[in-house]
Image (spheres, grey):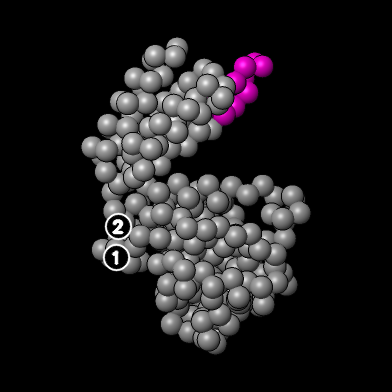
């Protein structure tokens, strides 16, 4: 889709009443954030939106001014509540036009089952380029710096491989330490290491297992050497209190 394009930041817009009223579990945010992290791209913000064209258009316009790429997920199907395509066009000042390749793909995929409403999925903002899943053949699209993907997680995961192909952010590194204790003991140690390594992000993620707290400590950095040094220092401090 975008060959050898340096992208450092992304914004996510997750569209759908079904997400915000609890009818459907949001699996797409994790798919997107994991995929972008692995590509070296930092997610600056994520926003969940109802199926409201004006609100989606405002969010797209704002996000496009704050990140290198905007990923919009959901609302590109054929029903009355699928309003992402016109909303993205409105945000970018682009009319919807019938996309010949999109129409051809829909006719081939649906065959005799094709309905007039299905064909509306080929009405995309002017200048849009298709982003096609390698296994499913289902498409999303990109227009300018906005990438629009379907809301069904299995389809999004397939298309995301294509959407991220050729993108390259700076290398990012990660280490994880599992600790069988509560955060209260860890807090001063984390504060000390963070003070020595302000360029290393340190996250503390507690869980309760069998009535006992366990904590995942996750360290992330753009600098492998600094990350290794911070990890070793933290392990040393943890060893002293264990």
**22 within the magenta span:** no
Residue 123 vertical placement versus 17 (above, below): below
Q: Which mark is residue 172?
A: none
**215 within the magenta span:** yes
Residue 161 or residue 121, whichever sits in front: 161
Q: Is residue 5 left or right of residue 45?
A: left
Q: Is residue 8 left or right of residue 30?
A: left
Q: Inspect this view and state whether residue 38 appears.
A: yes
Callout 1–callout 2 Cβ contact below 8 Å? yes
Q: CA distance from mark 1 to mark 2?
A: 6 Å
Residue 5 vertical placement versus 240 (above, below): below
Q: Residue at x 57, y 62 (%)?
A: 13
Residue 239 vertical placement versus 8 (above, below): above
Residue 175 or residue 101, whichever sits in front: 175
Q: Which mark is residue 5?
A: 1
Give the image location of residue 71, x and y in percent: 49, 63
Give the image location of residue 48, x and y in percent: 63, 59
Q: Residue at x 59, y 71 (%)?
A: 59
Residue 193 location, quadrant: top left
Give the image location of residue 74, x and y in percent: 60, 62
Mark 1 residue element: strand
Answer few, some or many: residues within 10 Å of disc 1's Cα (few below 14, many 20 plus, some between 14 and 19).
few
The segment highlighted magenta reads 206-216
The mark nearer the N terminus, 1 or 2, is 1
Give the image location of residue 104, x and y in percent: 48, 75
Q: Residue at x 54, y 73 (%)?
A: 62
Q: Residue at x 51, y 69 (%)?
A: 63
Q: Which mark is residue 168?
A: 2
Mark 2 residue element: strand
Residue extending furthest left? 225
């Amino acid at each position: 889709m975008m060959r050898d394009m340096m992208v450092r930041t992304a914004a996510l817009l997750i569209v759908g009443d079904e997400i915000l009223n609890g009818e459907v579990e949001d699996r797409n945010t994790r798919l997107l954030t994991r995929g972008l992290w692995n590509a070296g791209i930092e997610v600056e913000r994520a926003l969940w939106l109802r199926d409201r064209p004006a609100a989606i258009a405002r969010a797209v316009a704002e996000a496009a001014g704050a990140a290198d790429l905007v990923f919009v997920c959901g609302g590109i199907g054929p029903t009355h509540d699928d309003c992402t395509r016109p909303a993205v066009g409105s945000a970018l000042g682009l009319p919807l036009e019938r996309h010949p390749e999109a129409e051809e793909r829909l006719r081939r995929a649906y065959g005799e089952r094709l309905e007039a409403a299905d064909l509306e999925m080929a009405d995309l903002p002017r200048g849009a380029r298709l982003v096609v899943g390698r296994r499913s053949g289902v498409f999303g699209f990109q227009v300018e710096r906005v990438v629009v993907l379907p809301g069904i997680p299995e389809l999004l995961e397939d298309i995301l491989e294509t959407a991220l192909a050729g993108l390259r952010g700076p290398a990012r590194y990660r280490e994880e330490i599992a600790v069988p204790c509560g955060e209260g003991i860890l807090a001063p140690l984390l504060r000390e290491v963070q003070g020595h390594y302000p360029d290393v992000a340190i996250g503390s993620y507690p869980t309760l297992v069998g009535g006992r707290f366990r904590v995942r400590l996750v360290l992330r950095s753009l600098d492998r050497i600094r990350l290794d040094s911070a990890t070793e220092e933290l392990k040393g401090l943890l060893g002293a209190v264990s």
